[in-house]
Image (cartoon, helix red, strand yellow):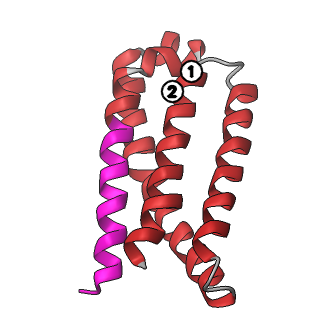
Amino acid sequence: MNNRLLILIGLMVGLGLVSAILTYLRADKMSPLTDLATKGVAEVRKGNIIFFGVFIPVLFGPIAYVIYRTILTRSPDTAQTWFLALAIGMAIVLTVLAGVVFKMRGFVEFLVLHILYTAGLGWWMPRLLA
């Protein structure tokens, strides 16, 4: 198996595990009150594990890899810097959007998740692939 693929899969699994644990423990703080009232905390936690622990890492891992490879082919000398700047910019935008959509409910949890993904896919992945 390709070494780059193993690095990407390892990062995705690690990010998925930490995300799943965080969102499982903090489901009552970051989920909408209507979901908590209708589904209950146990069902919301199960949904959070699937969404944040599986779907998000599988979605963002390959996308980040393709974007990094594209930036690397266009400017190999500054690819890591540009990619990290792009990841930080996206994290800021997504954090603001999460604050607006969820009316600041779970803002700290979403901020931690976005910092985690920025560090994992925006900083660690390019360093490990270099």
Q: CA distance from mark 2 to mark 1?
A: 5 Å
Q: Say the numbered circle drawn on residue 109.
A: 2
Q: Quadrant of the C terminus?
A: bottom left
Q: Nearer the viewer, residue 10 or 71?
A: 71
Q: Secondary structure at mark 1?
A: loop
Pointer 2 with pointer 1, Cβ within 8 A:
yes
Q: Position of residue 4 (x, y in %)?
A: 35, 80
Left or right of 44 on screen, residue 10:
left
The residue shown at (43%, 69%) is 127
Amino acid type of the residue that numbered disc 2 sits on in the rendered structure: Glu
Q: Give the quadrant of residue 8.
A: bottom left
Left or right of 105 on screen, residue 93:
right
Q: Say the numbered circle drawn on residue 121.
A: none
Any part of residue 49 in sight: yes
Magenta-drawn stretch contains 41: no
Any part of residue 59 in sight: no
Q: Which residues are magenta?
A: 1-20
Q: Which residue is mark 1?
A: 106
